[in-house]
Image (cartoon, rainbow, N blue to C red):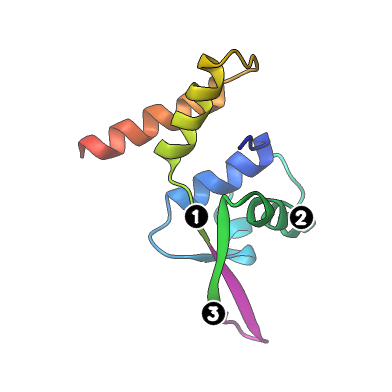
Amino acid sequence: MRLSNKEREVMALLWNSDAPMTAAEIVEVSENRSWKENSIYIIIKSLVDKGAAAYFGLKPTATNNARTLKPVISAEDYALSIIEDFKKGDTFDIKLDVDILIDGIRSMKQ
């Protein structure tokens, strides 16, 4: 599974969250995002379609209930899958994926 830069940005937020997040919460905690606020729903749908994330439930908001999203694949498993693809000969820019692996390894040490 290959994630785009925008998808990795959203997944990083989900991986670092202790609880499932709504689209509004993802936008709220995003500091240096490369996507427009209205694009979050397209990115979320893509992550769900790829099996990287899943809808988890509903969270009450001021006006309605919002669906929450949680990761299905861990950062470590995603990074390992990228390394396996690279080992098979797939060539691409893996810098961000290696960063995810490094963060995952660091979190396992804590």
Q: Circle 3: is it few (<14), some (14-19), or many (20+) Cα within 10 Å? A: few
Which residue occupies 54% across, 79% down? 59
Local secondary structure at mark 3: strand
Q: Please determine whether, in this image, residue 67 is positioned above or below residue 34.
A: below
Question: In the shown orientation, is residue 40 left or right of residue 82?
Answer: right
- Cα distance in 3D space between marks 1 and 3: 17 Å
Please name whichever residue, 67 or 29, is drawn nearer the observer in this view of the structure. Answer: 67
Q: Please determine whether, in this image, residue 68 is positioned above or below residue 76.
A: below
Which residue occupies 59% across, 48% down? 10
- Cα distance in 3D space between marks 3 and 2: 20 Å
Q: Circle 1: is it few (<14), some (14-19), or many (20+) Cα within 10 Å? A: many
Q: Which residues are magenta?
A: 59-69
Which residue occupies 29% across, 32% down? 106
Q: Using the image, tell me which numbered label, if any, was put on residue 59.
A: 3
Local secondary structure at mark 2: helix
Q: Quadrant of residue 4?
A: top right
To which residue does mark 1 refer? 71
- Residue situated furthest front in the rendering: 88
Quarter in which the N terminus is drawn: top right
Identity, as a three-letter code, of the amino acid under mark 1: Pro
Q: Please determine whether, in this image, residue 25 is positioned above or below residue 75.
A: below
To which residue does mark 2 refer? 42
Whether residue 50 appears in this view of the structure is: yes
Instruction: Give yes or no for residue 61 being in the magenta stretch.
Output: yes
Identity, as a three-letter code, of the amino acid under mark 2: Ile
Mark 2–mark 1 CB contact (< 8 Å) = no
- Cα distance in 3D space between marks 2 and 1: 16 Å
Local secondary structure at mark 1: strand
The x, y position of residue 28, in whole percent, is 59, 59
Give whichever of discs 1 and 3 has the lower sequence position.
3
Q: Circle 2: is it few (<14), some (14-19), or many (20+) Cα within 10 Å? A: few
The x, y position of residue 57, in whole percent, is 53, 76
